[in-house]
Image: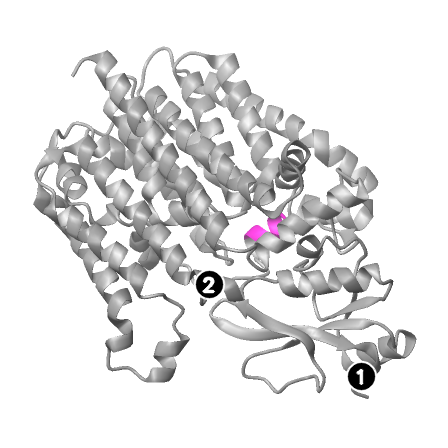
Amino acid sequence: MTAPQNNERGTHLLWVAIGLGVCLMAVGLYTRPLMTIDETRYLTVAWEMRNGGDYIVPHLNGEVYSHKPPLLFWLVNIAWTLFGISDWVGRAVAPFVGLLSIWWTRKLAQALWPDSPRTAALAPLILASMALWSIFSTLTMFDTLVTFSTLITMSGAVMSYRGQQTRGWLVAGLGLGLGILAKGPVILVHTLPVLLLAPLWQQRSPEVRIGRWYAGVAMAFATGLAVAACWVLPAIIFGGEEYREAILWKQTAGRMVNAFDHRRPFWWYLPILPFLLLPWAMWGTFWKSLRGLTVDSGVRLCLIWAGATLLILSFVSGKQIHYILPAFPAIALLMGRVVAEVRVTSRWEVAVMGWGSVMLGALLSTYRLLPIPSEYVTSLPFAPQWGLVILLGGVAILWAKERAVSSAVQWVAVAACCNVAAMHFSLQDKYFSTCSVDQISQRLSEIEKAGRPIAHQGVYAGQYHFPGRLTKPFEVLDSIEQLQAWQEKHPDGYIVGYEWEGQQPTWSTFTDAQPYRRGMKDHRVGLVPGALVPR
């Protein structure tokens, strides 16, 4: 295949990858509500930023919010300004950045392997269809922004390695600065190992001088700090001493060394990683071709990028699946590079992926017929008919004949994304519908407009302010004594209360109650009139 044909094929596969990302984003917006507590919280912070007019210091429930920098909240407000204030506009921002990451993965592949257009063609499609990416890149999460910032930084480093020193380090610095504005210094976890371990991945040549390289790293670091300082300096001036201490220390080193939440063992990522890489972790062509891989500078860069990220985050006590999302472009680039020189894949080399899809679809389609207690069957949130879609996708993969690798990747990627879409539709009625807080949020909006005070039982994570377009903060009540004292002052008010699954009900009177799902547990949230708080 000639170079123009290769480029044309690569562009075609890029558009397929972006098209799959757009379809999954649309499916997510259609089937899922705003998910508590993360998506509701982040859009509430963006809403309070817009409603209060303070675009420097984020707020949640009227108090400064120091847990995350403001880049996502700024982008959401820009989108609202352009397209109007709505749930779907706010929720589309982070997934749109995910689409940009798919596109930039191709650009980085072209920079790393200019003589291998097939790598640049395959890597974006592999990334778009990885299980972790295809799910979490459609959510309103900071890690998608960190991924894009990481890709920019890596591109700048490669530009510098190829001889574009000044421009490359400025691009890398821009990536670092955006990463800091997205999620703080955690961007260094994903980028610093590659920048500091350059002698391990660069090919030795007279043009590459280590001293000059590290001077460039310092330049990029200074540029990143300058970009971040455009927000940090005003924020520490206007946010007060407590906010200053939080953003400069507690929410950076404190989270890295001794995370507040999600404490898990060192090895936690290792056993789940193969599932997060599905379907490509089961691709026989990749494993067969691994032995013939030429370990060039690009391969070493990606190995350091992905390996160091996983290792460092394994040492951090707090672990969440989406924390490792910025390492997935590196894995996709590696996989694309491994199979780039393979021309044909047999039907047997994709058989494991096909059988996996068939078994998953068969299980989802028939689980109600299995000999398991009925109470467990009825509690499962899956709609069986969508399992047939997954099963048929697996059959299609098994039925495929021997084909070119690029065609096989396209075929499997489409099937994998169809599986993710089918899972979304399968969960829509019995799971996602119980995650919505729109009903109680609208009731709270009516109460606020009537001029009645509102309080909240326990820690408030901003679940209701954006869905209800509320403008006044809740008073947070942590004990029964506080509840009783508040009732005496506000007998005409309402308290947002909860009944937790497996615990004795707190309230004798519970109005406007609705399901409140956290994970797989069904709780209830409702309103308690102030006059009926138990004494």
| Residue type beneath disc 1 | Leu
**Mark on residue 154?**
none
The residue under the point 26% across, 66% down is: 365
Q: How many marks?
A: 2
Image quadrant holding the N terminus, namely top left
Image quadrant holding the C terminus, namely: bottom right
Spatial separation of the CA atoms under disc 1 and disc 2: 41 Å
Q: Which residue reaches farthest right?
A: 489
Residue 137 in view in this figure:
no
Q: Which residues are magenta?
A: 251-256
Which secondary structure type mostly characterizes the magenta part of the structure? helix
Relative vertical location of residue 163 with respect to residue 50 in this rendering, above or below: above
Q: Helix, strand or loop at disc 2?
A: loop
Decide whether residue 289 is among the magenta residues.
no
Q: Residue at x 31, y 55 (%)?
A: 275
Q: Position of residue 135 (x, y in %)?
A: 41, 49
Q: Quadrant of residue 453?
A: bottom right
Q: Secondary structure at mark 1?
A: helix
Please indicate whether residue 152 sits to the left or right of residue 44 in the image.
left
Q: Which mark is residue 264?
A: 2
Q: Give the answer, above or below, for where 428 lies relative to 395.
A: below
Judging depth in this view, the residue of 147 and 279 nearest the camera is 279
Figure check: 525 above or below 298: below
Q: Quadrant of residue 454?
A: bottom right
What is the x, y in percent for residue 20? 36, 38
Residue located beneath label 1 in the image: 532
